[in-house]
Image: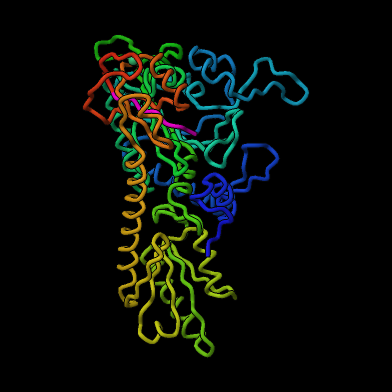
Amino acid sequence: MPTTRVKKEEDFHEWYNEIVELSGLCDKRYPIKGMNVWKPYGWKIMMNIDRLIREEMERTGHQEVYFPLLIPESLFKKEEEHIKGFGKEVYWITHAGENELEERWLLRPTSETAMYPIFSLWIRSHSDLPFKVFQIVNTFRYETKQTRAFIRVREIHFFEAHTCHRDFEDAERQVEEDKEIAKRFFKKLCIPFIFNKRPEWDKFAGAFYTISIDAFMPSGRTLQLGSIHHYKDNFSKPYNITYEDKDGKRKYCHQTTYGMSERVLGAVVGIHGDNKGLVLPPAIAPIKVVIIPIIFKGKEEAIINRCLEIENTLKEASITCTTDLREDTPGSKFYDWELKGIPVRIEIGPREVENNTVVLARRDTGERIEVRKDEVIEKVKELFGKIEENLYNSAKRMLEESIVRVNNLEEAKKHEKKILEMPWCGNEECALRVEEELEVKTLGEAVDVKEVKGNCPVCGEVANCIVRFAKTY
Ligand code: ZN
């Protein structure tokens, strides 16, 4: 029996809107549009996602910091491109109590302009470099488009890593490290993606270049999950972030950032979920295993005791689990936990007690197997691996099938809800023409595609790269 009123394959966005509330991720009734309330279950999953990010940061020598939410207008305005890019999206604070502030403050839309004046005080010499920090905070952007839970919101749960380096090349190495971090991180979430080098007119405000991390959603649109920016010395000059090099000269740092947001959770919901509810990768599931007693009259005690025994065994192996002892039918319990996306369900009835077995059911495929109770830990862990593999492979198939290579606009028009790859001369006018004719956005240069053949379909010039287009969020 499907849980959702709307089917995923029939109306993805309605299904998505329904499922984020039904499964207990968020409450959208807060009276400011785009500012949703995180419910305990959703927040717990987000915290688990953050834990995976923190592990990556720890592994790669980034230190966690926490900068203030408010930024004085004068600091914000130091980098010209940055203010142009964010100017229309920021919230201003103009009053404190009854008094008008001498200088306006803004709520951070991102933290470059809060951090960099302080970095310029912290960084003194080449021995302070590379300097690598990150923070996980809320940021604010005034969205005028239609809001959508986790995907387009006005208060954003945000991760941002900021680094400073001696020169351009060292910052380039950081970009490569960030790409590796993204690969490991998204693998744990079973989310495949593509890197695209955003075109000049759509790069991050103030960046030298931007590499975006784009996933493909079942709606046929791409979702930008994060971005990696090389700033060169574009920010270090206005913010005076310098160091004394070995030769005694003062030089400007080269900088990078890597940002991601709660959109990651939106992707998990949208890509893995089905008509029964969420399907969570084991790495972020708040409860990895739920144990359901299948009660028969006269056997209650033996069954419940066996459930609790298995719960203990799993907990000793650090597998988060719970036994559902509510007075309800097994069927309705199955339904609740499927909605929440718990990876593995264990069923124990009189037969299993007698045979010293348990039944394991996978959330992703629904497959059930009976195993001996003394091998339960091993088998559960094995299932986690299989679930991860299956979720990743299905999503990868969807992404791969979405990418189509076309050589002219007529051919491109035949494909809807796809990521289009085309040879490109690199000129803005040509890409904008494609955007207009096909009603798509330029994702950017396909940095992972090395072989370039063909001519730009708009101007006919020999292409120097492959460019991707898609409808986007
Ligand atoms: Zn062209």
- Considering depth in this image, is 371 or 423 the residue closer to the camera? 423
Image location of residue 455, percent across then percent down: 27, 19
Q: Is residue 89 visible?
A: yes
Task: Please indicate whether residue 149 sits to the left or right of residue 119 in the image.
Answer: right
Q: Residue at x 49, y 55 (%)?
A: 278
Furthest residue toward top? 249
- Considering depth in this image, is 315 or 321 the residue closer to the camera? 321
The quadrant where ligand 1 appears is top left
Magenta run includes residue 467? yes
Furthest residue toward right? 98
Note whether 241 is above or below 359 in the view shown.
Answer: above
Task: Please indicate whether residue 404 sits to the left or right of residue 69 in the image.
Answer: left
Note whether 263 is above or below 94 in the view shown.
Answer: below
What is the magenta segment's predominant secondary structure?
strand
What residue span does the magenta drawing correspond to? 466-473
- Considering depth in this image, is 307 or 135 the residue closer to the camera? 307
